[in-house]
Amino acid sequence: MELYSRLIDAPSGDAQIVALLLHGRGSDEEDLLPLAPVFGPTVRVYSLRAPFAFGPGYAWYGFGRDGAANVQEWQASVEALNQWVETLEPVLPVVVMGFSQGGMMAQALAVHRQQQGLLGIISLSAPPLLKPPPAGSLADFPIFWGHGSEDPVVVPERGEETLRILEAAGARVSAHRYPISHTIGETELRDIQRWIRENLVNY
């Protein structure tokens, strides 16, 4: 299963990192592209389109009539993301930023790859992983976690559950709560930029 992507190359012309953007359910690869400048001049940014049609956009996995997530689609998307990272040329370290369902997929990719080739992830307004990660599978792995206290889509309680799961897996989580809805705020973007500077200092 191939994933369509949009590319914004490093403005400096000398990419040292790849940033991978994963949109939320019902959106597409255009949604997060305006955030590319957050990563700075030495980062090559790819925004990926989820593989399954959903409403006017796309989703990383769907849901059954009983409201349960389609685990087979979820697993297929995780594998497709992993294969996409594997085929990156030239091989560069990767940071993954995902919003909502895309944030959970960023977490799942880190677990699936056992962190290999990944510098860290930025998980925004994301629900918990469908399958809890093994203990220690995210040991000392840097994660930015952000969530809105007024989020009606992924309610704050679900966001806090996500945070507890990541911490239980050993991740080094920088947790941030904001008085916003299901969106990404300006303060959050400034905090992300600070986190990037602090965690990707060698790049």
Image: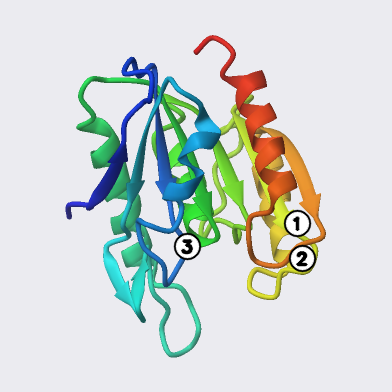
Q: Position of residue 201 (x, y in %)?
A: 59, 13
- Can you identify the residue that label 2 sits on? 157
Q: Residue furthest front?
A: 11
Residue depicted at 71% across the width and 67% down the height: 181
Residue 50: where, in percent of width, then height? 32, 60
Q: Position of residue 51 (x, y in %)?
A: 27, 62
Front residue of 116/38: it is 38
Report helix, strand or loop for mark 1.
helix
Q: Which mark is residue 24?
A: 3
Which element carries disc 2, helix, strand or loop?
Answer: helix
Q: Is residue 169 visible?
A: no
Give the Cα separation between the discs numbered 1 and 2.
5 Å
Q: Are marks 1 and 2 in contact (CB under 8 Å)?
A: yes
Q: Are marks 3 and 2 in contact (CB under 8 Å)?
A: no
User: Total marks drawn?
Assistant: 3
Residue 186, horizontal then vertical, whole percent: 69, 48
Work out whether 10 lies above or below 66.
above
Quadrant (top left, top right, bottom left, bottom right) of the N terminus:
bottom left
Q: Secondary structure at mark 3?
A: loop
Q: Amino acid at mark 3?
A: Gly
- The numbered dot on residue 160 is 1
Question: Residue at image x 47%, y 46%?
Answer: 106
Q: CA distance from mark 3 to mark 1?
A: 18 Å
